[in-house]
Amino acid sequence: MTYVICYTVQAKVVDHDGTVVSSDRITRQLEGLACHDDSVLNYAELPFDDECSFQGGHPRLTIDSKGQLLISVEVQSNRKLTRNEINALREDFEAQITDGIGAGCFDDLSAATGLSIEVRVPLRTRFTQDEGQAWIVKPATARGNEKRIAAVAKLVDQMDVKPQAPRVRVASVEPANSVEPAVSEKAATRGQPNFSKLFRLLAKPERNSLFDQIKAEVEACGNDLSSIGDGQYPYGNFGDPKLLRLLLNAGLPPNILDEKGHSLLIQAAGSPKCMEMLLKLGLDVNRICDDVYRSTALHRAAHVGSETGAKFLLANGADPSIKNEYGKIPQQCVNRLAPNRKALEALLQPPGSV
């Protein structure tokens, strides 16, 4: 007999300006989109996982009876879990899902459409255990994903109409000897830059290789990114100092938080050169961010398996004893699949700990 453990959490679709996309057509097209090439079981650290012979664990988008978008994770076990085991599994899944979506669960969707999947806050979750079999990836899953994403991309293109400039009353022309010059219609209608296309480029997983396109879009925005506020900037990872320098030189506030509450320092946690650039601007190396994890840059370096990033942060005053929202220090956040896992865990050992 096998058991299926199902974890669900309410989710939402957002554009890169942080706006929630309320479209039933898009939601319906997203149903069934799955993270086919990765599983939460690859990162779970549970003392009972071997004896349960877990299978499945691929995050998938589903819709409940009320039409609410959900992120669902189903795991199959060869025995029934105890209450304590279920609580441990729930805590592990919850930590992974709240961070894993941004880290790559649905990157293909973001790259093709500019839309992201986020969990709703406060978290609304459900955890069940019943007899049965879990959903598993099938040969057709990847093809199904491609069709769903293509359909959503078409809907986004239909909806993505550039707003017309608001009508303004043009000031009347004063006599020639007037001190005040007339206000031109062009100046009167000039407003804030439209960062939509720039955000779409910056949200792509391959953004570090899109320098020329991003530079052109920064120039189209008047080389002025100073009006970008917290929660607007897209989530991603910096690996190219040249790209970061371009954005900072155009006025991107170095203390800005992205759409998931991460600092630029966390985004750059795998690149010592990018982090050095940010620390020279006065950023706090131990800043706890406003994401659901309440992490520091050192937590992120551990999570992505960046030994060079962790060494740089430690050399610049990062504290390896700071705990995140789930009570974990950076050492406990090291990616279990990282080839340098043991070396990284030794590096992140807090001073004086056993």
Image (cartoon, rainbow, N blue to C red):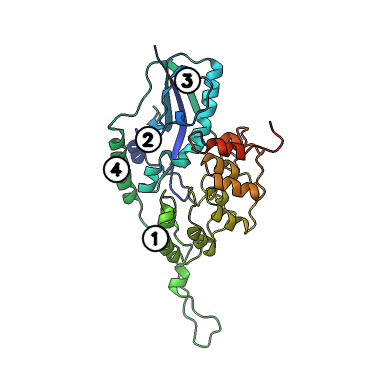
Mark 4 residue crowding within 10 angstroms, few (<14) / some (14–19) / many (20+): some
Alpha carbon distance from label 1 to label 2: 29 Å
For badge 2, the amino acid type reads Asp
Q: CA distance from mark 3 to mark 2?
A: 21 Å
Horizontal side, residue 339 vs residue 131: left or right: right
Task: Residue at 56%, 50% (x, y): give it.
Answer: 257
- Most extreme residue toward the right is 352
Q: Quadrant of residue 276?
A: bottom right
Residue designated by label 4: 151
Q: Which residue is mark 1?
A: 213
User: Mark 4 vs mark 3: which is more N-terminal?
Assistant: 3
Residue occupying the far top of the picture:
1
The type of residue carrying mark 4 is Ala
Q: Secondary structure at mark 3?
A: helix
The residue pinned by badge 3 equals 50
Inter-mark Cα distance, 4 to 2: 21 Å
Residue identified by numbered label 2: 37
- Is residue 317 visible in the rendered image? The answer is yes
Q: Earlier in the sequence, mark 3 or mark 2?
A: 2
- Can you say which quadrant of the picture contains the N terminus? top left
CA–CA distance between discs 4 and 1? 25 Å
- Which circle, 1 or 2, is nearer the viewer? 2
Q: Nearer the viewer, mark 3 or mark 2?
A: 3
